[in-house]
Image (spheres, rainbow, N blue to C red):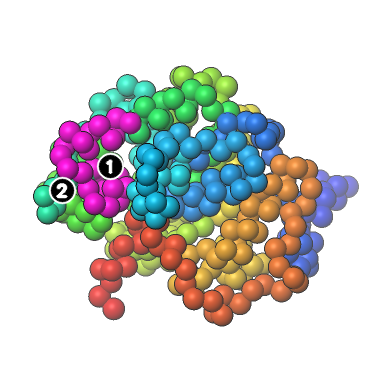
Amino acid sequence: MNPYQSLPPRSFWRTAVAEPAWADIDGLWTPKFAIGQDDVLLTAGSCFARHIGRALRDRGMNWRDAELAPPGLTPEQRRDRHFGVFSFRTGNIYTAAVLRQWFAWALGAEEPPREVWREDGRWYDPCRPSVEPAGHASPDELFAARAATLAAIRGALAEADCLIFTLGLTEAWRDTADGTVLPVCPGTVRGTFDPARHVFHNFTFEEVRRDLTAAVELARSVNPGLRVLLTVSPVPLTATATGGHALTATTHSKAVLRAVAGELAAGHEDIDYFPAYEIVTGTPFRGAFFEPNLRTVTREGVAFVMDRFFGALAGRPGAATGPSATAPDRHDRPTAGEDFWCDDAVLDYYNAR
């Protein structure tokens, strides 16, 4: 007898992936720790992460919105100013380095940068340039708004039971004047690109692991019992600055992020990995959970992912999201307006074709 003879069907590609109908593929995640209805949950990360917070709230989970919108804003104004999207109003956090920065600033381990961007008489925060679409009236107003976010991060980390962080990219731009890793390339969403100052960097496995480990350690310095659930966004890069092909650059980036998340989860009892990336991009689903642009995840795809998430937490299989096990035809639907939330999506504007 050899070791493979005692393995369950889910360990073999044929019985776990090739033979079942796509809607019946399950058992992809066995949670390492319970997440209860009353546990305080925080979400942060790339644009795909906003679906997780919304789903937690819709299912009656204790998702913490640590930075509430001021009274008097319309739903559209709250949306445009990124209230209620993530647990803190940081905007998208695509890289582990940016997560580490926000935590270090919030907890006093580092001083946040004083750089500001000015356009048309308004002031924008380079660390979250899309959060205030109309900008700020002055640098002082900008820094006060950032201080409110840092206070929200500090308070929420101290009270949370679980942080759910979605890794998005390895590619980023660094400001060599102060070392800050920026969420977007200057000159795209806002700001002006200075080739002598703004330097491209593609984070390696070791760098991502270092930054993500440091972010977790910072959070646990104020909350030793904090559990961490990692995911990887299935949304591809809009564009790559490596000079390579967008497909191979995306594969490289996601492979690095997935490997880091897997290694940290394997080495720590209180860090887990949920396979949202595999559920959307996996071979058996044949790209059916993407809109025609092959970037945006469909509503059905999000629902399928979150059904598997909640089903695993409850110890039951996820329910099929459609009337049959036939994958939906993505070509029958127009592309949704999801790119509003993804700063990275603005890069397609600069495509010459």
Viewer-closest of 138 and 260: 138
Q: Residue at x 75, y 71 (%)?
A: 324
Residue under pointer 1: 127
Q: How far is the residue under mark 2 from the one under mark 1?
A: 16 Å
Q: Residue at x 51, y 57 (%)?
A: 234
- Residue 158 percent across, percent down from the top left: 48, 22
Asked where in the image residue 328 lies, by quadrant, the reply is bottom right
Viewer-closest of 118 and 211: 118
In the rendered image, the residue lying farthest to the front is 72
Answer few, some or many: residues within 10 Å of disc 2's Cα (few below 14, many 20 plus, some between 14 and 19): some
In the image, residue 112 lies in the stretch drawn in magenta: no
- Residue 33 percent across, percent down from the top left: 68, 33
Residues in magenta? 125-148
Answer few, some or many: residues within 10 Å of disc 1's Cα (few below 14, many 20 plus, some between 14 and 19): many
Judge left or right: residue 90 versus residue 186. right
Given the image, on which type of amino acid does mark 1 rest?
Cys
Judge left or right: residue 198 versus residue 203. left
Viewer-closest of 258 and 89: 89
Marks 2, 1: nearer the viewer: 2
Residue under pointer 2: 122
- Residue 215 percent across, percent down from the top left: 43, 31
Number of marks in the image? 2
Query: Does label 2 or label 1 sit earlier along the sequence?
Result: 2
- Residue 89 percent across, percent down from the top left: 38, 41
Judge left or right: residue 173 versus residue 107. left
Callout 1: SS: loop
Given the image, on which type of amino acid does mark 2 rest?
Arg
Circle on res. 317: none
Q: Residue at x 39, y 55 (%)?
A: 76
